Amino acid sequence: MVGERVARGLGAPPEQRRPAVRDRDPFSVEIYRILEGSGTLVTGGFLELPLAESTNPNLIRTERGIRDGLARQVREGDILVLQPGTPHWFRSIAGDSLTYMESRIQITTHPVQFQP
């Protein structure tokens, strides 16, 4: 899957805000290229329970947060490569939005569990 997405920050109008969903894809390497904006990406750690419903059976999600993850500042031009099963989410976005291109490359048919 390749696509471009916009993550909306708290400064965006309410109708454009998206819930802060934390997820992990246990089958695919995820590659993000930050096209515009900046923010804080949290990776690793554990998804907080309970898990949220997901329309994609290949994604495991929660709306509660990530425990024990590593926070990094990301900005336009950065390329991020996340291994299968790595929990991640944009904890904060500077300004109104952060635009990124996302690619997922399935590399296994057996789910990978991230272990910090």
Image (cartoon, rainbow, N blue to C red):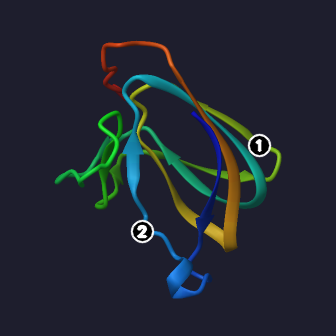
Report the amino acid beneath label 2.
Answer: Pro
Mark 2, residue position: 19
Q: Tell me the SS state at disc 2.
A: loop
Give the image quarter of residue 85. top left
* Quadrant the C terminus occupies: top left
Q: Image height check: is 13 above or below 50? A: below
Q: Is residue 32 above or below residue 55?
A: above
Reading the image, the residue beneath label 1 is 78
Relative depth, front residue between 22 and 115: 22
Tell which of 6 and 79 is nearer to you. Answer: 6
Q: CA distance from mark 2 to mark 1?
A: 23 Å
Q: Position of residue 87 (x, y in %)?
A: 40, 40
Name the spot of residue 39 as percent of width and height, x first: 65, 61
Residue drawn at (32%, 48%) of the image: 55
- Residue 47 — which label? none
Q: Residue at x 36, y 46 (%)?
A: 68
Q: Is residue 79 left or right of residue 48?
A: right
Q: Earlier in the sequence, mark 2 or mark 1?
A: 2
Position of residue 112 measured from the top left corner of the image (x, y, whole percent): 34, 20
* Residue lying farthest to the right in this orientation: 77
Number of disc labels: 2
Q: Residues within 10 Å of mark 2 (few under 14, many from 20)?
A: few
Disc 1 secondary structure class: loop
Which amino acid, by three-letter code, is at mark 1?
A: Asp
Residue 75: % across, % down:
76, 54
Q: Return the residue nearer the eye: 95 or 15.
A: 15
The residue at the point 39 percent across, 38 percent down is 24
Name the residue located 48 percent from the left edge and 70 percent from the top edge.
18
